[in-house]
Image: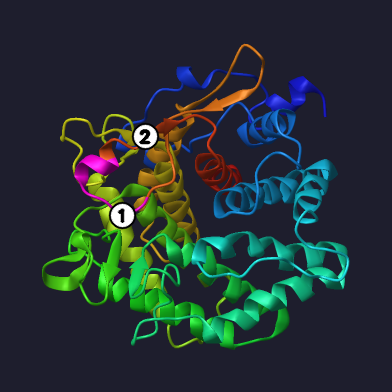
Amino acid sequence: MSQLNRRSVLLGGAGAVAALPLLTSQQATAEPAVAATDWSVELVDSTIARHKPSDIGGWGYAIGLYLYGQYLVYKRTGTKSYFDYIKTWMDRFVDSSGNISNSFNNLDSMRSMQLLPILHRETGQARYKTAADKLRKRFPSYPRTSDGGMYHATSKVGQLWGDGVYMAQPFIADYAKAYNDPYGFDESTRNMVTYFTHLQSDDGLIWHAYDADGSESWSSGTGHHSKFHWGRAIGWFGMAAIDILEVLPADHPRRQNLIDIVKHLATGYQRFQDPATGRWWQVVDKGTTSGNWLETSCSAMYTFMLSRGVERGYLDPSYKAVATKGYQGVLQKISLGSDKRTNLTDICEGTNVGDLNYYLKRARKTNDNHGLGAFLIMNEQLTRVP
């Protein structure tokens, strides 16, 4: 595809994101948010230009998130080099017999496994399923709370972190769908419900983490949960619910529980969306707190969940306006530099559980994989369903 056509695929003309006006709620209901530039293609091309598969990053959840987003772009565009890049990266870790060197002693180490059923389906090579089988066999013995929640890490006894569900549960649900293994449907939904029971707050959000015995300094008090609403953890949770619902049987007994989670989060997303920009805050409910800042990765995640939720009928159509405004807000954070490569800004670095100052002081990165992956997932959804 030519450079002009590649950049103008959505509207037929190149345009600067900075020139896009924010819509009023009335306009957003009637007019779709459409970007003049195919930002998914621009972002993937820029990332590939910056990094070879050998140096883009080692095994980890953030690179797994990004490459999953790149796969979505491949499925839309058919650009084979995008898929080949993903396969080359995975082949650094999976040998010709399907062996993969990873102990899977924390949920973060599981996210990249989401790519293995995809690679098996796309290539027909059994070694990718062999590798996926290793993680599937890890779940029954993985330590968990008395009510079934998988520890965020084997070293973090009794701890459930909201971001952890996205790292493991969509994989096991996808595995269940791909290989007729109903265990994964039960396990993934059990974890979602268990986590939500402990993390749910009355304002439409969730707390970042929970500690079963309350021994962590951040878990003191009623409920044994942390005390702040960190943006990306809540985004991970919403995307996990959506992704599992995509493959969960229609008659599964916990399906409505997951839909209820999506509805709960949607109320919070709507309530705390910044009216000026359409984005969401690093600490979601403290927009007026000095030092707080609007964070790109969570804004992309919320926008994705809202759009897909409306599309699937989980959410009232009125939420489309919230997604539209969120989409336009995130588009304000991506641009082409003088080198004609994309820059996506204001992405929170990897984050643990902490106090308010800890969250507010997290570094604001540019082109961090947390944001790149979330942007691609959002943009592929909003490109398809404006």
Q: What type is the residue that disc 1 sits on?
A: Val
The mark that comes first in sequence, 1 or 2, is: 2
Q: CA distance from mark 1 to mark 2?
A: 39 Å
Residue furthest top in the image: 338
User: Does any portion of residue 253 appear in the rendered image?
Assistant: yes
Q: Which mark is residue 353?
A: 1
Task: Categorize mark 1 by other alpha carbons within 10 Å: few (<14), some (14-19), many (20+).
Answer: some
Give the quarter of the figure containing the N terminus.
top right
Q: Tell me where residue 238 appears, x and y as whole percent.
A: 41, 60
Which of 120/58 is in front?
58
Residue at image location 65% in from the left, 64% down from the top: 113
Which image quadrant for residue 360?
top left
Classify residue 185 by image quadrant. bottom right
Three-letter amino acid code at the position of disc 2? Gln
Please tell me whether mark 2 sits on a helix, a strand or a loop: helix
Specify the segment rendered in magenta.
Answer: 352-359
Q: Nearer the viewer, residue 192 or 270?
A: 192
Image coordinates for residue 367, horizontal then vertical, percent:
54, 32
**Mark number displayed over residue 27:** 2
Q: Which mark is residue 314?
A: none
Q: Residue furthest front?
A: 155
Q: How is the image coloured?
A: rainbow
